[in-house]
Amino acid sequence: MGCGPRENGADRRVEIRVEDLHKSFGGRAVLCGVELEIRQGEIVAVVGGSGAGKTVLLDHMVGLLTPDRGRVLVADHGRRGRPLVDLGALDEAGLDRVRRHWAVVFQKNALFSGTVFQNIALWLKENTDLSATQIYDRVRDALDAVGFEGDDSILTKTRGELSGGMAKRVAVARAIAMSPAIIFYDEPTTGLDPQNAAKIHELICATHERARRENGGQTSVIITHDKDLLHRLRPRIVMLHLGRVFFDGAYEAFERSDSEIVRPYFELMPMLNQAPIPE
């Protein structure tokens, strides 16, 4: 069944609104008027061919790039009523305020050279009033959630001691520990073998479902080219083509599409894990 939306989300708050977004690099247009709205609790996969602008769009949504034209509005969870604010109009303090409610799982994991515990605990120490005991418990709970139950040795391992799959799971644990309103995943299964890719599929879904039960819904935005990830999660699909949103709809409609753009792309998407899909 996957973990995509199960109800009409039209009455949910807008978390991200992209309006007429344009971006060029060295005279080459990458985004040419992207329009997109993402609501609370949705799980959205952004797909498209190489050079379609997926990562450029993500970098705009997290405030790492400034549009040439257009704007990105995001919900400010640090203010009463969670109003939409223009990322491009915020100063550093404003950006820090909105980013405090996000987590990003980077393609290369972005773990620093400290221990696993330090990687997960640092944000909690700097951005919450939790005690040392509470931080330890939060870190331990997050590691348990990604499959390190009862393994205390993981706490003292460093980045160099982790396999690619383990490092990705630690990056997801760090995101979980932050209890964010939005998690952004940038190519979460790239470079992983089929077994570890399958574990990450399950983790993304489990993390989304856990938040749905506990706080009414966490928004998940995934940049990916992994067909099996889409098949397992069955998210809303946003496909970029020639710098614009070409398709925006349910996974089932994307999978069945006979569009001369969608069909060849879908058929050629890599399936990184061939394990049976659980009912």
Image (cartoon, rainbow, N blue to C red):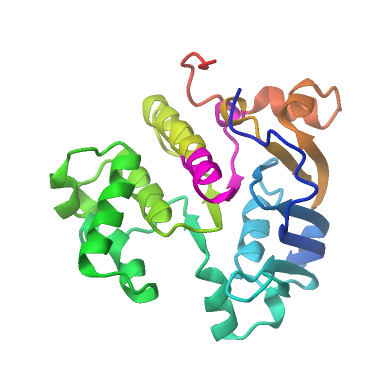
Residue 24 appears in the figure: yes
Residue 208 is left or right of residue 4, and the answer is left
Q: Where is residue 268 in the image (x, y as percent from the top left)?
A: 66, 25
Image-based side of 248 in relation to 89, left or right: right
Residue in front for this viewpoint, 173 or 237: 173
As rendered, which of 27 and 243 lies closer to the eye? 243
- Magenta span covers which residues? 207-230
**Residue closest to the eye, 115 or 261:** 115
Image coordinates of residue 96 in percent, x first then y, are 52, 77
Is residue 67 part of the magenta span, yes or no? no
Tell me if I can see residue 109 in this picture.
no
Q: In which quarter of the image is the N terminus?
A: top right
Residue at x-position 52% and y-position 17%: 277
Which residue is at 59% across, 45% downward? 222
Q: Position of residue 7 (x, y in %)?
A: 73, 36
Is residue 222 located in the magenta-colored stretch of the structure?
A: yes
Tell me which corner region of the image, top left, top right, bottom left or bottom right, holds residue 192: top left
Specify the quadrant that holds the C terminus.
top right
Q: Is residue 180 left or right of residue 194?
A: right
Residue 194, compared with residue 221, is above or below; it is above
User: Which residue occupies the foreground of this view, 236 or 269?
Assistant: 236
Q: Position of residue 44 (x, y in %)?
A: 66, 43
Q: Which residue is drawn at 60% across and 28% down?
A: 227
Residue pictured at 55% horizontal, 24% vertical: 271
- 207 on left or right of 47: left
